[in-house]
């Protein structure tokens, strides 16, 4: 009874509980803190020290996707490159690429998800390349998986495109079926030493952009359902797989919090898109329901899974999107992805800190 009261009291004292599953790493507690500091609670501050930010020069990172290379696409302002995340009670550790590479020597890290995962994967590879630009790297793609290897360090960083985590299968009659209980890629995931998962944005696609015709849920088949419902069912399938199949003493698992877009800022008293925004917002929109669903699923897990809780801190950064300086310009406004260099580099600083 006493331990229950202590737990309830600790939850009451916390303003922003960050879920990491039921089992917690010895140096990271339920508030997402290291040594008592909540890394996800803080503010963005301007840092004009050229040696600190940005963390790399996008013009000398030879493999940035066109859609993320905002400066090359003509973005004229650069202040968005100079903001760093400042936790309220500590400093976010500086990125040490050599230390990071040595820590992962002989290991494989894989990002699994949609183009937001691609954003983060490219950010990390640019951060590593910038620190040792003469180091040979090998980049190749096999099916849905991109593989980036540094032979010098014997490290591999992979990106597996899988927007829903669960499967979409083309049936014999050319019907695309979203199978909420099937994870055909999971055997490949289990081989990794570090996994970072992401899923949400493609669940919103409807009409011609919807990638399935039918949904198969156990023995039931139907046309569609509320997207939060489908999202939660898919996450539960993923969570059951982790709990039953993954040895988390050997494979460290992260789930990236929902990356916020800024397609509609009217409620914040600004324009209705990210166009023309060059500084962080002073306030943010309310809680993302999909983030609450993710936290609910993680709370119910038995294995050790970390939430990389980037949602709230990224909500302030409407200035960090490609806007009209993505791959499509004014014809394809992008308030969803993030410029590189930029906001996503901070996600990787947080990931590095939580890797220990």
Image (tube, rainbow, N blue to C red):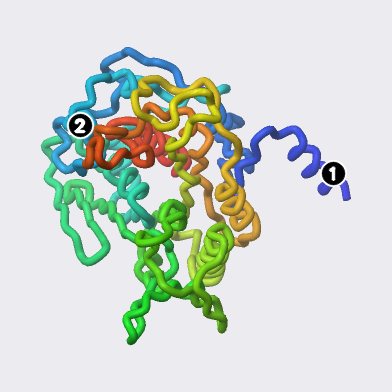
| Residue drawn at the location 58% of the way across and 32% of the way down | 38
Query: Residue shown at 29%/36% (left/top)?
Result: 97
Q: Nearer the viewer, residue 120 or 210?
A: 210
Dot label at residue 58: 2
In this image, 90 relative to 111: left or right?
A: right
Q: Which residue is at a point 57% across and 53% down the rendered structure image?
A: 294
Q: CA distance from mark 2 to mark 1?
A: 51 Å
**Helix, strand or loop at disc 2?**
helix
Q: Tell me residue 290's x, y (percent).
A: 56, 50
The secondary element bearing badge 1 is classed as helix
Residue 220 x, y percent position in the rendering = 56, 81
Res. 85 image quadrant = top left
Which of the two residues, 116 or 203, is positioned nearer the viewer here?
203
Q: Residues within 10 Å of mark 1 (few under 14, many from 20)?
A: few
Q: Write the residue at 48% across / 73% down.
A: 215
Residue 139 placed where, x, y %? Answer: 16, 53
Q: Which mark is residue 5?
A: 1
**Whole-percent x and y of residue 32?**
58, 39
Mark 2 or 1 closer to N-term?
1
Question: Quadrant of the rendered structure where residue 320 is?
Answer: top left
Specify the quadrant of the image occupied by residue 47. Answer: top left
* Mark 2 surroundings: few (<14), some (14-19) or many (≥20) residues within 10 A: many
Q: Looking at this rendering, what residue extends furthest in the right direction?
A: 1
* In the depicted structure, whether residue 210 falls above or below residue 217: above
Q: Nearer the viewer, residue 17 or 113?
A: 113
Is residue 185 among what the camera can see? yes
């Amino acid at each position: 009874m006493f331990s229950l009261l202590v737990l309830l009291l600790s939850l009451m004292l916390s303003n922003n509980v960050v879920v990491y599953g039921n089992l917690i790493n010895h140096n990271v507690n339920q508030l997402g803190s290291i040594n008592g500091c909540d890394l996800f609670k803080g503010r963005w501050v301007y840092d004009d020290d050229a040696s600190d930010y940005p963390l790399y020069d996008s013009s000398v990172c030879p493999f940035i996707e066109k859609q993320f290379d905002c400066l090359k696409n003509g973005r004229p302002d650069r202040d968005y490159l100079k903001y760093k995340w400042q936790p309220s009670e500590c400093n976010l550790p500086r990125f040490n690429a050599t230390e990071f590479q040595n820590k992962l020597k002989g290991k494989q890290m894989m990002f699994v998800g949609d183009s937001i995962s691609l954003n983060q994967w490219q950010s990390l590879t640019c951060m590593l390349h910038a620190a040792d630009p003469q180091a040979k790297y090998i980049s190749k793609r096999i099916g849905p998986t991109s593989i980036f290897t540094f032979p010098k360090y014997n490290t591999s960083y992979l990106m597996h495109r899988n927007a829903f985590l669960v499967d979409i299968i083309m049936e014999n009659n050319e019907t695309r079926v979203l199978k909420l209980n099937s994870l055909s890629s999971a055997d490949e995931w289990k081989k990794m030493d570090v996994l970072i998962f992401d899923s949400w944005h493609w669940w919103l696609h409807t009409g011609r952009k919807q990638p399935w015709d039918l949904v198969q849920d156990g023995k039931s088949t139907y046309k569609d359902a509320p997207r939060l419902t489908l999202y939660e069912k898919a996450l539960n399938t993923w969570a059951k797989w982790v709990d039953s199949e993954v040895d988390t003493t050997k494979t460290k698992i992260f789930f990236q919090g929902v990356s916020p877009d800024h397609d509609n800022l009217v409620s914040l008293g600004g324009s209705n898109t990210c166009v023309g925004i060059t500084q962080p917002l002073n306030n943010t929109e309310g809680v993302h329901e999909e983030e609450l669903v993710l936290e609910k699923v993680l709370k119910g897990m038995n294995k050790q899974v970390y939430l990389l809780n980037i949602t709230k801190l990224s909500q302030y950064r409407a200035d960090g999107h490609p806007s009209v300086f993505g791959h499509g310009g004014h014809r394809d406004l992008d308030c969803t992805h993030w410029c590189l260099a930029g906001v996503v580099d901070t996600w990787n600083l947080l990931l590095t800190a939580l890797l220990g």
